[in-house]
Image (cartoon, rainbow, N blue to C red):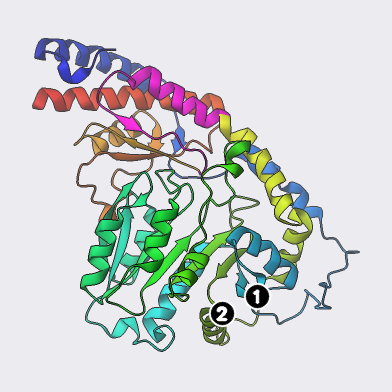
Amino acid sequence: MRDLTTLAPDDLRSLKSQLEQEYAAFKAKGLSLNMARGKPSSEQLDLSMPLLDVLNSSSDLTTEDGIDCRNYGVSDGIPEAKRLMAAMLDDDPENVIVMGSSSLNVMYDAMARCLDFGTLGSKPWAQYDSIKWLCPSPGYDRHFGICQAFGIEMIPVTMTEDGPDMDEVERMVSLDDRVKGIWCVPKYSNPGGVTYSKEVVERLASMDTAANDFRIFWDNAYCVHHLFDEEENQDQLFDIAEACAQAGNPDRYFKFASTSKVTFPGAGISGFAASPENVAEAKKLMNPQIIGHDKINQLRHVRFLKDAQGIRDHMAKHAAILRPKFQTVADKLQDGLGDAGIASWNSPRGGYFVSFNAFPGTAKRVVSLAREAGVTMTGAGATWPYQEDPQDANIRIAPTLPPLDELSQALDVFVCCVKLAAVERLLEQ
């Protein structure tokens, strides 16, 4: 296909007629396909079914240090689970708290503690007239939802191929002590698939901030979600804890991770890691909240996944299922839009998404057209704070849930919608 932006108006009108016929044929099929959220497929979930049989009525439910997992206690997690989550969090077990199934819940609670109590003796954030948060964009909509829930002003920050634009970040954090933190998905970022460079990590750790209680919320959700076997030796993420310690800011970060897309979403375990001082404070503030999380679930995850190598082996099975899906996305987009001059997209090495940029001013139209043709996408604008994409261009493609044949059909519809929306926009101009 020729570059659509170079076509004469008559040619655009002719193409629009062809695309409308193609689109009508898709609508007539009565499709019901979903690429809205990054959910594991049924085939991926089947990989973890043995987890349900690891423990039974004859199992020893006592931990290595004699804790009966059937009873109360151990608010920070059993020792075996602390080691397991430490492997995911790239930290020492003594700096890890093992919690429930949702890292999003852990992040929400961490934000709430800072608002209600401050952090390490600082003024509670809720006592400011307003506080602000840096949001690398496009980014994760549920992070933005936490800020909105607490009335925190969100400031978009441009994402580059190395991570957030650090010139922007350093400028903003130096000017206002109400800028209290930044969201980071540092490995295979959601949705752009970016792994932060060592320089970006070091600048985040060492930058001068007007707020002495500035916090990096380091959501390493995709830390073990490689698509390729060789990825372990490429693009290694520099540890934010090490960087902060070297920079003399050892308390600046909070790390988060979970097994949500490793085993069963909603039935896994999560982890929080921070400096010893931050961990001690978090445990103290959590004491009135909970006596202990689900230790039986912690124990069965340890006995199923075992250790860091066990996690790697298990995630290699996930990767084998996901690689053909991401390749299908790449092939369909290239075949349908590669020479059209109206779109761009990333080719992630891991994670759960493809970040797609449609012709400016058409993302909402594309998503609407797709929905009418039976293909549900993530809402346009969802990857920006307040759902306000200034270019109305970014769309998050989530290829993991549908079976391969359904994914292929959905992408055919999507490509048609992208072209039709772009042609409409070009004719308007």
Magenta span includes 77: no
Work out which quarter of the rendered image holds the C terminus and state it: top left
**Residue shown at 58%/62% (left/top)?**
89
Write down the quadrant of residue 90 in the picture. Answer: bottom right
Please indicate whether residue 145 sits to the left or right of residue 237 in the image.
left
> Is 101 situated above or below 371?
below
Asked if the residue under mark 2 is in contact with the one under mark 1, i.e. CB atoms within 8 Å, the reply is yes
Nearer to the camera, 233 or 145: 233
Nearer to the camera, 179 or 169: 169
- Any part of residue 137 in sight: yes
Please indicate whether residue 68 sits to the left or right of residue 312 in the image.
right
Q: Mark 2 points at which residue?
A: 276
**Residue shown at 64%/52% (left/top)?**
264
Disc 1 from disc 2: Cα separation: 8 Å
Q: Residues within 10 Å of mark 1 (few under 14, many from 20)?
A: some
- The residue type indicated by label 2 comes to Pro
Looking at the image, the residue that sits furthest to the right is 58
Please indicate whether residue 383 sits to the left or right of residue 267 in the image.
left
Magenta span includes 339: yes
**What segment is highlighted magenta in the picture?**
324-351
Write down the quadrant of residue 69 in the picture. Answer: bottom right
- Any part of residue 267 in sight: no
> Is 379 situated above or below 255?
above
Q: Residue 132 carries which label?
A: none
Helix, strand or loop at disc 1? helix
Q: Name the residue under label 1.
A: 94
Q: Where is residue 363 in the image (x, y as percent from the top left)?
A: 26, 37
Please indicate whether residue 333 sits to the left or right of residue 275 in the image.
left
Q: Where is residue 36 in the image (x, y as percent from the top left)?
A: 43, 42
**Residue shown at 11%/13% (left/top)?**
8
